[in-house]
Image (cartoon, rainbow, N blue to C red):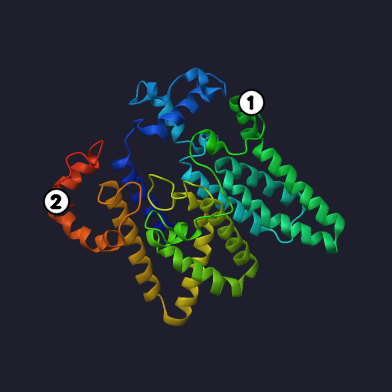
Amino acid sequence: MREIRHRSILVGVWFGILMILFRPQLHGMDTVAYYAWLRAAAIRHSLDVSEDGPPDRFAGLRPGRGADGVAGLAAGVLHVAHPFMAHAVDFFVNALFLWEWARVNPPSGRDRLRLGLIGGLAATVRYQNASLLIWPALEDLARLRRAPREGLSRLAALGIGAGIGFLPQMIVWRVVFGQWVVGNPYGIAGAGSFDGRAPHLLEVLFSTNRGLFLWTPIATFALLGLIGPLRRTCPRWAHFILAQTGAQIYIVGSWSAWSGAAAFGPRLLTGLFAGFALGLAALYEAIRARWGMRPVLALSGVAVAWNLILLARYGLGDVPRMGPVPLTDLWLGQLTFPMRALERVGWLIQGLLRQDPLDGAPPGL
């Protein structure tokens, strides 16, 4: 009962913050594009967005004229045909896939069909999520050597499920681009190209331009938990999560737009954090067993404070929305920002409630 109460408090705080910061307005390239997709599918009952004209016609719509679009933007299922800004849905489908994969071992053909369906749907959210299917496919191929019929049936079920799950995306491609399979839909939209021969692996991990470890230090501890405690206690889980982490870093690093452009942190790796949570939990359990809860609470508090401060700085323009950030500004700014913010608390409150927090920003914040 106590745990349920604590979770309810966290959910209540989250909703309270959301109510303060949420602005029911369509602005920017991505949300306007979402409205075009929503209008085509939900209003005109068509997947062809060409009739909606240039996206600029929808800019600045507010409730009354664009309430249907705003309501649709809150339902992530309508976003899966678009490759950008699907972060919450991306996290969800990765967590769902991991849960379904770990739930049954050994799996039946029906289990593999369900897992393939989830994997196919995950690939419609972000195409890079197709890598989720590699590990269970390798498991089934290994099973072929010991039990050929069982391994083949599981592998076939996985493929059929993945095909069904990904079919809606293929239908959209057929309607929009005239072909069932598009090699690089990002390139068609002018969003860069892929080169697997020279991936930006170090940049994805360590760059001040949204690098994983510099923008999200808690990921370092999560990986330590995966490599250490979780690999000892549950090697099957650890190996899958580590393999998926490597695959995602390679895929993202192979993209010329590996940083995600305007983004708060490594947004293209959002799906990995479902697995990172398990690594962090294993590390916390190992720390608790040896030193008690105080180090766990301290690490959690510092990590949460770091992220909230960085989020405030990002939202208020203290760090640039895109591009590299000098390391001293990124890290030392975390220490100086709270004091600078306290000196301007009145402006901060007004800035958070304004449509654009960057308007009228005082110098030096």
The residue beneath circle 2 is: 344
Residue 324 left/right relative to 166:
left
Q: Position of residue 365 (x, y in %)?
A: 18, 52
**Residue flagged by tag 2: what amino acid is it?**
Arg
* Location of residue 356 in the rendering, given as x and y in whole percent from the top left corner: 25, 37
Q: Quadrant of the N terminus?
A: bottom left
Neighbours of disc 1 within 10 Å: few (<14), some (14-19), many (20+): few
Kindly indicate the quadrant of the structure image that contains residue 337.
bottom left
* Vertical comparison of 270 with 288: above or below: above
Q: Residue at x 40, y 64 (%)?
A: 217
Amino acid type for the residue under numbered disc 1: Gly
Instruction: Provide the secondary structure element on which disc 1 rests.
Output: loop
Q: Residue at x 51, y 70 (%)?
A: 225
Q: Mark 1 vs mark 2: give the one in front.
A: 1
- Residue 343 placement: quadrant: bottom left
Q: Indicate whether 62 appears above or below 96.
A: above
Q: Secondary structure at mark 2?
A: loop
| Above-or-below relation of 238 to 325 | below
Of marks 1 and 2, which one's residue comes earlier in the chain? 1
Binning the other alpha carbons within 10 Å of mark 2 as few (below 14), some (14 to 19) or many (20 upward) gives: some
As drawn, the label of residue 178 is 1
Query: Looking at the image, can residue 1 be seen?
Result: no
Q: Residue at x 36, y 64 (%)?
A: 303
Image quarter of residue 175: top right
| Residue 46 or residue 286, whichever sits in front | 46
Q: CA distance from mark 1 to mark 2?
A: 54 Å
* Rendered location of residue 48, percent (x, y): 56, 22
Q: Is residue 138 left or right of residue 60?
A: right
Q: Is residue 279 above or below residue 65?
A: below
- Foreground of the two, 317 or 6: 317
x then y, percent, for residue 70: 40, 30
